Image (cartoon, rainbow, N blue to C red):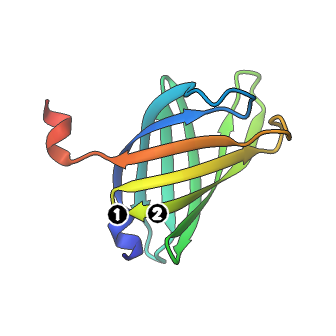
Amino acid sequence: MTVMDLAGNYSIEGSNQEESDQPSYHGILTLSIDENNRIIAQWIIGDHIQNGTGFYKDQILVLNFNYEGEDQEIYKGVSVYRCLSKDILDGFWSEKHGNPLYLGSEYCVKIKSSQFLN
């Protein structure tokens, strides 16, 4: 698998940095590749948008992300995904100001282009 195989849109199900193991959000993750083979990421969860950049090596994808909170502060974190296949990412994440006792989690499945049409 190459970095180019990761480009596309993914349906995501995730949980926040809290005690519960139950999914607390759903959304879309879009991955694209820049001219230096680095990953450009954008998460859309409801009306919330997060942006990130990162890299891929040996079936591991690492993304540094940031977003503006409702308090107009910038929040930052890192997501790490195991690339189970070119269509499935299984990961965890942490924010600088999140609960340090827990990690968030995210499971991503690539959306085939025909799924957008239905």
Instruction: Sort mark 1 into few (<14), some (14-19) or many (20+) by Cα contacts within 10 Å.
Output: some
CB contact under 8 Å: marks 1 and 2? yes
Quadrant, the C terminus: top left
Residue drawn at point x = 39 percent, y = 54 percent = 88
What's the amino acid at mark 2?
Answer: Cys
Circle 1 SS class: loop
- Place of residue 111 in the rendered image (x, y in percent of width and height, measured from the top left): 28, 45
Residue at the spot x=52%, y=78% of the render?
A: 58
Q: Which residue is mark 2?
A: 83
Residue 105 found in image quarter: top right
Give the amino acid type for the residue marked by disc 1 in the picture.
Lys
The foreground one among 68 and 114 is 114
| Left or right: 8 in relation to 107 | left
Percent of width and height locating residue 10: 37, 46
User: Between marks 1 and 2, how big is the CA–CA gap?
Assistant: 7 Å
In this rendering, is residue 86 above or below 36? above
Residue 77: x and y in percent read 72, 48
Q: Residue furthest front?
A: 21
> Mark 1 = which residue?
86
Q: How many marks?
A: 2
Vertical side of 57 occupied by 13: above or below: above
